[in-house]
Amino acid sequence: MVSNIDRSPRNRQGTEQGARRLPRFGFLVVWVSVLLGACHAAPRAAVIVDTGFVRAEVRARLGEPDRRREFKMPSTPFFGPQESLAGRVPAGTSVEEWGYREGDEERYVWFAGAEDQPGDRWRVIATGRYPAEAVY
């Protein structure tokens, strides 16, 4: 039987070099994949904002809010997303609300602090997510 396989040392050497390159190439592919994955930022909806954060911390995690508003906590019953603040701060307390649109949801971040305290030192008192198109 005749074999077409070249068993010369020259051919074996090329195969061995190729076999040594394969792990290096595989390592390179894995390394590039890891780097690309690390560059992909987490979606804003996945970012956690805890009570006690100051405005700068929220801004660093979520960016500038899509909207802001300030209000005083009412003393009478009320409804809407702000209901979650009842019992957290006394009636008449100034509250700042930041809103972030996240797909079909609206994320709310509420800040409060002492009246004589600068706004940048106010802290998150609550957060919540609600349907963006809900009417209250």
Image (tube, helix red, strand yellow):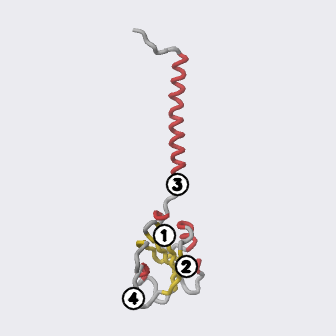
Point out which mark residue 61 bears.
none
- Residue type beneath disc 4: Pro
Image quadrant for the C terminus? bottom left
Residue 14 or 135: which is nearer the viewer? 135
Please name which of the two marks, 1 or 2, marks the residue nearer to the observer: 1
Horizontal side of residue 72 vs 86, given as left or right = right
Please name which of the two marks, 4 or 2, marks the residue nearer to the observer: 4
For mark 1, give the secondary structure.
strand
Residue 39 in percent (x, y) is at 55, 53
Residue position for label 3: 40
Please name which of the two marks, 1 or 4, marks the residue nearer to the observer: 1
Picture residue at 50% right of the left edge, 28% below the top: 19
For mark 2, give the secondary structure.
loop
For mark 3, give the secondary structure.
loop
First reached walking from the N terminus: tag 2 or tag 3 = 3
The answer to whether the residue labelled 2 contacts the one labelled 3, judged by CB atoms less than 8 Å apart, is no
Residue position for label 2: 122
- Residue type beneath disc 1: Arg
In this rendering, the answer to whether 28 lies above or below 85 is above
First reached walking from the N terminus: tag 1 or tag 2 = 1
Q: CA distance from mark 4 to mark 2?
A: 25 Å
In this rendering, the answer to whether 92 lies above or below 62 is below
First reached walking from the N terminus: tag 3 or tag 1 = 3
